[in-house]
Image (tube, grey):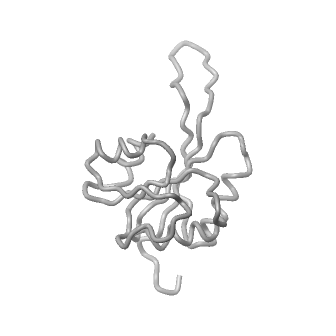
């Protein structure tokens, strides 16, 4: 999933802010020859340079969702994206995330469902859904007032 996020949402030399737990995204960033900053979500000041992609787990500790998404929006280039990794099972979380992001000026772009194994042709397979990924974006055409 990290490889797809990095390749689909960034270009070479774009900055990726990694707030996720684990080395998976870092490996994808290195393989795609992107630049990254690894931070804790509650850390103030994720750097002076705006990022094209911010990837984070959910929920975020020690900050409100509204504050977190305001910080994300301020750290994104226009047209940049935030990928929020949600553990599967909480049917309310995606809606809560989208509402908090919209209040901070981010727009809902896409919902990706990542499964632990692909279905096999000719076999009825029950997919164990591993995680939901919500993609939110900062408008590339926003005006100062909006």
> Could you tell me residue 139's position as x and y percent?
46, 70
Q: Is residue 16 left or right of residue 13?
A: right
Picture quadrant where residue 17 is located: bottom left
Q: Is residue 133 left or right of residue 37?
A: right
Q: Nearer the viewer, residue 22 or 83?
A: 22
Query: Residue placed farthest to the top in the image?
Result: 122
Picture quadrant where residue 97 is located: bottom right
Q: Residue at x 38, y 53 (%)?
A: 9
Q: Residue at x 47, y 86 (%)?
A: 144
Q: Nearer the viewer, residue 75 or 100?
A: 75
> Could you tell me residue 82's position as x and y percent?
49, 59
> Could you tell me residue 15's position as x and y percent?
33, 60
Q: Residue at x 42, y 75 (%)?
A: 141
The vertical placement of 113 against 122, above or below, is below
> Could you tell me residue 106's position as x and y percent?
54, 68
Q: Is residue 45 left or right of residue 65?
A: left
Q: Tell me the quadrant of the picture where the N terminus can be found.
A: top left
The vertical placement of 31 against 116, above or below, is below
The vertical placement of 58 against 104, above or below, is above
Query: Residue placed farthest to the bottom in the image?
Result: 145
Picture quadrant where residue 75 is located: bottom left
Q: Is residue 83 left or right of residue 91?
A: left
Q: Residue at x 62, y 28 (%)?
A: 128
Q: How many marks?
A: 0
């Amino acid at each position: 999933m990290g490889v797809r996020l990095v390749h689909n949402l960034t270009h070479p030399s774009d900055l990726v802010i990694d707030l996720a737990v684990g080395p998976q995204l870092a490996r994808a960033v290195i393989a795609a020859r992107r630049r990254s900053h690894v931070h804790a979500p509650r850390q103030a000041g994720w750097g002076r340079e705006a990022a094209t992609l911010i990837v984070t787990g959910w929920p975020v500790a020690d900050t409100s969702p509204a504050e977190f998404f305001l910080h994300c929006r301020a750290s994104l280039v226009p047209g940049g994206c935030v990928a929020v990794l949600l553990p599967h099972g909480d049917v309310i979380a995606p809606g809560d995330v989208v509402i908090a992001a919209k209040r901070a000026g981010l727009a809902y772009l896409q919902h990706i469902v990542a499964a632990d194994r692909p279905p096999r042709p000719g076999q009825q397979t029950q997919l164990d859904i591993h995680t939901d990924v919500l993609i939110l974006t900062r408008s590339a055409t926003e005006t100062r007032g909006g």
